[in-house]
Amino acid sequence: MRKWTLLRGWRGLGIGVAIGLSAGAPSTAMAHPHGWVDLSVEGVFDGEGDLTALRQRWRMDPFYSQVVMEDMAQVKGETTMAQRLDALGVEIRNNLETNDHLTHITLHGKPVAQGTVTDTNTEYRDERLIFSFVLPLAKPQAMAGQTLRYRIFDSTYYIEMLHEANADGSQPLPGALTLENAPQGCRTRILKADPDPDKVMEASMLDTTQQGEPNLGQFFAETGEITCPG
């Protein structure tokens, strides 16, 4: 079990709502006391060496994934499972759009505006539900001599969202944060969260019916960095 996996359902992602709309009934996953998402992110550069997007892949935990698939298998009608997964992906995208896709991006310490998500895909592979998408920046960001930072988290901390890591969670995997078409010398780094013990205690005291202070999840969020030489 991961450290700080103290989550209480899937309402923070809006995914519980999405399942209800897709399957026609509330999902029991909303009451599940432990849940997580494994993240991988790719910074996408254009031909000018500017960062244009963050391509993301979210792998839902096996228990939640199983519940989703069982719910969708019970949907009446002639739609295929692929079509149902596509519909679920649309619902997830629409729910996340109201909250900047749980992705908080900064440059020079100032927020970076986001564009409209593209290339969404929802699939079930290796007993995991996978939601992937491209999150464009509102405008390309010149990265020469700069460091862009992002954090991806559910503000209510119902769901733990961490980069893909090794079995004990101590080290991120090499593919957890990568770059596409980046200028020579650009590099990446993932900084682990170091929450105050009081915040850990606060999270551990919350049950499935309670919600902590606003933005509790930020204290448990990892920080991804993309740095390019001047």
Image (cartoon, rainbow, N blue to C red):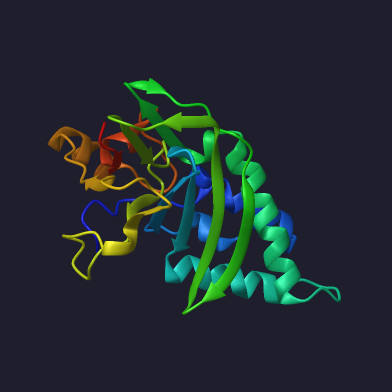
> Residue 129: where, in percent of width, then height?
52, 68
Q: Where's residue 22, x and y in %?
A: 72, 59
| Foreground of the two, 188 or 59 | 188
Residue depicted at x 47% and y 38%: 48
Image location of residue 111, percent across then percent down: 42, 23
26 vs 178, nearest the viewer = 178
Q: How many marks?
A: 0
Image side of residue 221 versus residue 36, left or right: left
Image quadrant assignment for residue 132: bottom right
Residue displayed at 37% across by 42% down: 157
Q: Residue drawn 43% across and 52% down? A: 181
Is 5 located above or below residue 191 in the figure? below
Q: Residue 117 or 10: which is nearer the viewer?
A: 117
Q: Is residue 25 visible?
A: no
| Rendered view: 159 above or below 112 | below
Locate residue 9, reporting x and y percent.
Answer: 46, 52
Relative to 67, is 177 above or below? above
